[in-house]
Amino acid sequence: MSKQETISPKEYQELMKSASKQNKYRNKPKEYRGRKYHSTREANYAAELDLKIRANIVKSWDPQFRWDLRIKGQHWVFYAIDFRVEMTDGSIWYVEIKGTPTPDWTQKFKATKILFDELTEGEHAKLYLNDELIMESENIKP
């Protein structure tokens, strides 16, 4: 039997504290322009949106846009999509930047797809997952 190094209860607590702070999906939170994002990928997308504003491609954007997902008129859950982006052509992009999907997120995103026309009524809206167009709204005002 090999001899193992022992640690004190205090060292154990410190190790457990640092382990619990680590994101289970290994996302590294990153700050961009004073706002904390869940991942480096999200922060980089925010920086990209700012460049697109300067290039007159994007008019404005909001992070963590919150929807009230309702089923048969009843509140089910809130869902914050990573970005709501107003394009200079008048269309609205809803963008989710996702690495490893969690079961909770998968359920909310499926519901968002089902409710998308209702959530974006009257908008020329597009739903993106990372760089992939998932769907466009059908209830567009002329």
Image (cartoon, helix red, strand yellow):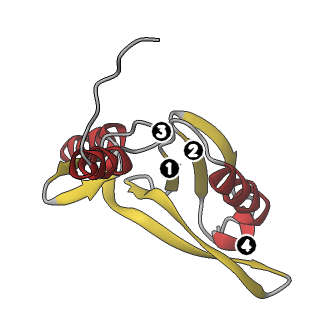
Viewer-nearest residue: 26 or 120: 26
Answer few, some or many: residues within 10 Å of disc 2's Cα (few below 14, many 20 plus, some between 14 and 19): some
Which SS class for mark 1? strand
The earlier-in-sequence mark between 2 and 3 is: 3
Q: In the displayed structure, does residue 63 sit left or right of residue 95?
A: left
Q: Residue at x 51, y 48 (%)?
A: 96
The earlier-in-sequence mark between 3 and 4 is: 3
Q: CA distance from mark 1 to mark 4?
A: 17 Å
Q: Residue at x 59, y 67 (%)?
A: 123
The earlier-in-sequence mark between 4 and 2 is: 4
Above-or-below relation of 39 to 90: above
Mark 1 in CB contact with mark 2 (< 8 angstroms): yes
What residue would you read off at disc 4?
118
The earlier-in-sequence mark between 1 and 4 is: 1
The earlier-in-sequence mark between 1 and 3 is: 3
- In the rendered image, the residue lying farthest to the top is 1
Question: Which kind of residue does numbered mark 4 sit on?
Answer: Glu
What residue would you read off at disc 1?
95
What residue would you read off at disc 2?
128
Mark yes or no: residue 88 visible: yes
Which SS class for mark 4? helix
The earlier-in-sequence mark between 1 and 2 is: 1
Q: Which mark is residue 25?
A: 3
Where does the image place residue 5, in percent across and percent down from the top left?
28, 25
